[in-house]
Image: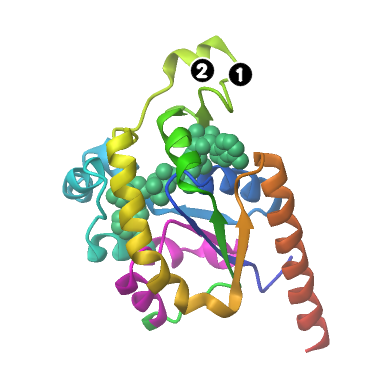
Amino acid sequence: SISDPLKVMISGAPASGKGTQCELIVRKFGLVHISTGDLLRAEVAAGTEIGNKAKEFMNAGQLVPDEIVTAMVAARLSREDAKQKGWLLDGYPRSLGQSQNLEKMQIRPDVYIVLDVPDEILIDRCVGRRLDPVTGKIYHLNFFPPETEEVKARLITRPDDTEEKVKSRLNIYKQNAEAVSSSYSNITHKIDGRHSREAVFKEIESLLSQLQYDKVKIMKSG
Ligand code: AP5
């Protein structure tokens, strides 16, 4: 086993493909996937206090207040599995305050991946997105239709995936992107996210494989 596991951050605009790539990364590298969007949606679905607070912000396409999200991420990162297997942080940090919180906790990734996708593609991806509430899998009506009629019948649409709300989410992303990414400029890898899911993953896979190899080599020589 590897005693210095990979620590990965993935960022990019709404619907740039973060969740889709995370499914593939987890399958190959076994990292613990920590998606603030998924964690928040689970709180909303369970009707918890956090969920009730977060819901109105999410449905309006706005950011949930930092303190709520930061507490959630800190709790998840400190669990034993994340320390053992490494982690894949998806959708956090999303504001300057959040990246400063990570600095304070001395949490730094090995690599900061940015999925780069033009705006006009993002709107189509959002509006056609469907989720399987049973498996958590992400589909798209045109690009990744469900495998069976049974899955198709239970797919749900996210309340924040209307064209209007996507535009608001995209604006908020753009307002924060530079401030957040400046903390990670020396470990940033921009990836062209316009290509197919498989082509994008190929690039991420080779990047992470190389990183993992380098880490093992450093440990053996050190
Ligand atoms: P979150 O769930 O993180 O939403 P997001 O950042 O807007 O990202 P998405 O989930 O919309 O997209 P994605 O990049 O994962 O794309 P996907 O793979 O699904 O956050 C939701 C909300 O929670 C926020 O708005 C906010 O309110 C709150 N929140 C979360 N984190 C927060 C934080 N840190 N602070 C404060 N608030 C926070 O793909 C999209 C679609 O495209 C799918 O249909 C997919 O099938 C398709 N697709 C994917 N890849 C490809 C490809 N290569 N080719 C063609 N189609 C593709």
Can the viewer see residue 40? no
Q: Secondary structure at mark 2?
A: helix
Say if 11 sits above or below 149 in the image: below
Decide if residue 27 is on the left or right side of residue 72: right
Q: What range of the chain is rendered magenta?
A: 74-103
**Residue 102: where, in percent of width, then height?**
40, 75
Q: Quadrant of residue 56?
A: top left
Q: Is residue 95 magenta?
A: yes
Q: Dot 1, how many residues are within 10 Å of its Cα: few (below 14), some (14-19), or many (20+)?
A: few
The number of numbered discs placed on residues in the rendered structure image is 2
**Residue 175: where, in percent of width, then height?**
33, 63
CB within 8 Å, label 2 to label 1: yes
Q: Quadrant of residue 194?
A: top right
**Residue 55: where, in percent of width, then height?**
21, 43
Residue under pointer 1: 147
Which residue is more in the foreground, 177 or 43? 177
Q: Secondary structure at mark 1?
A: loop
- Per the rendering, the mark at residue 151 is 2
Residue lying at 51% horizontally and 64% vertically, measured from the top left: 80
Quarter of the image where ligand 1 sits: top left
Q: Amino acid at mark 2?
A: Val
Decide if residue 154 is on the left or right side of residue 212: left
The quadrant in which the C terminus is found is: bottom right
Which residue is more in the foreground, 121 or 127? 121
Q: Amino acid at mark 1?
A: Glu
Q: Quadrant of residue 38?
A: top left
